[in-house]
Amino acid sequence: MLAFALGWPTSELPLHAIGWQALATLGFIRKGALRTPAGLAGLGLTAASWAGLHRIWKDSLPAGAAPRGRDQPWMLRVWPSPRTT
């Protein structure tokens, strides 16, 4: 249950997760984390994490949010416009 609660916001809001991770990474860099091999390895792992989160976001785009109006092509197939005579 705890794993779900911690992972859910990250998978639902991957760009937000990249944002807060970027802020944390910048903080570590400012404190000199890149001066050590462990810091460089951490940066590499963080970059890989960002690539995965970007992929999650990119894969979610086809599902997409509901369009704003009925002028969207798929909306016209689902709810055709009434015929005017």
Image (tube, rainbow, N blue to C red):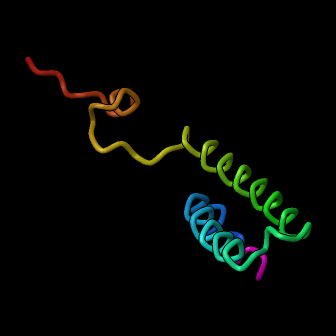
In the picture shown, does residue 51 fall above or below 33? above
Q: Does the magenta stretch include residue 5?
A: yes
- Which residue is the extreme one toward the left? 85
Can residue 5 be seen here? The reply is no
* Percent position of residue 32, x then y: 75, 75
- Near-viewer residue (32 or 11): 32
Up the image or down, 36 lies above or below 31; here it is above
Instruction: Residue 21: give x, y in percent of width and height.
Output: 65, 68
Q: Main secondary structure of the magenta part?
A: helix
36 displayed left or right of 47: right
Q: Is residue 1 left or right of residue 41?
A: left
Q: Which residue is drawn at 57% across and 65% down?
A: 19
Q: In which quarter of the image is the N terminus?
A: bottom right
Residue 44 shown in magenta = no
Q: In which quarter of the image is residue 36?
A: bottom right
In percent of width and height, residue 41 lies at 88, 63
State the residue at coordinates (40%, 46%): 66
Magenta residues span: 2-6
* Horizontal and vertical percent position of residue 44: 82, 57
Task: Tell which of 52 and 48 is nearer to you.
Answer: 48
The quadrant the C terminus occupies is: top left
Residue farthest right in this picture? 37
Looking at the image, how many numbered discs can be counted on the residues?
0
Most distant residue in the bottom direction:
2
Q: In this view, does 65 lie to the left or right of 56?
A: left
Q: Residue at x 76, y 82 (%)?
A: 2
The residue at the far top in this view is 85
Task: Report whether residue 27 is seen.
Answer: yes
